[in-house]
Amino acid sequence: MWNGVRDIAKAVVKKPLNALGLDLIRFNPVRSSLSNFMWISSFDINTVIDIGANTGQFAMRIHAIVPNASIFSFEPLEESFKQLQTNLGSLPKFRAFHWALGDSNTTEAIHRNEFAPCSSLLPMTEVHKKAFPHTVHETREIVEVRRLDDVVADLCLQDNILVKIDVQGYEDKVILGGERLIGRAKLIVVEVSFQTLYERQPLFDEIYRALRSKGFAFIGHLNQLSSPLDGSVLQADAIFLRESSADQD
């Protein structure tokens, strides 16, 4: 996803440059490549549920595309959450929640990666570590985990909802804990894996079947990430549209 796929790729490019005393600087991190996502504006999105917000990369981009939409972001890591609030806290229709999302209300130890976008409630596999050696170092951080349906029960959410899920292998748990909200969603953008990068994670086929059973059609993907070792595809941002919307369009 915007938090992981793009940032991992950026880190892979930056590492050899840094060794030469150089750096890779993006001119405008919010507006860069916005044209890739302008299609979202055609769905009249009124509410964005940003799950796994990190420091607000996706939220900033989506705000530029649908500036009148309400954005509800979820980020469990303390440092990332503080930066998220700094980056977007001034927006009148933005609200941040300092929780992870899953299929139960509990407290868990998250694997806080030195490269924050790769942090996960699941242990990282050797496939991930070998492909991206800069992600091998991690510590533990205790975080609160909540069910999405419980969290949004008291929120006033306008329909035409976009749900973005970027949770490093915890996608199935988020979906299980948010079935009612996802049942209202019009568009879902979810980071999916094609190889096991985190222990016990669902791969693309499982996420595809889960969302198909809830009335969504897979309509493509963005930001495909390949292994720097052999070029095999590791992840992509999969796009699912509610079938009634697809029929109307």
Image (cartoon, helix red, strand yellow):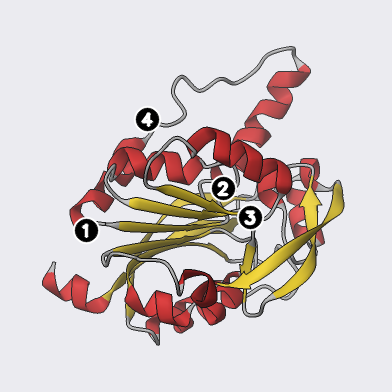
Q: Locate the C terminus by quadrant.
A: bottom left
For numbered disc 2, what is the local secondary structure? helix
Q: What residue type is labelled 3?
A: His
C-alpha distance separating marks 2 and 3? 22 Å
For numbered disc 3, what is the local secondary structure? loop
Q: Earlier in the sequence, mark 4 or mark 1?
A: 4
Residue visible at 67% across and 35% down in the picture: 12
Give the residue at the far left of this rendering.
248
Q: List the residue tagged with mark 3.
A: 98
> Percent from the top left, x then y, of residue 233?
57, 57
C-alpha distance separating marks 3 and 4? 26 Å
Q: Which mark is residue 31?
A: 4
Q: List the residue tagged with mark 1.
A: 43
Q: Which amino acid does label 1 sit on?
A: Phe
Q: List the residue tagged with mark 2.
A: 5
183 lies above or below 220: below
C-alpha distance separating marks 3 and 1? 28 Å
Residue 76, quarter of picture: bottom right
For numbered disc 4, what is the local secondary structure? loop
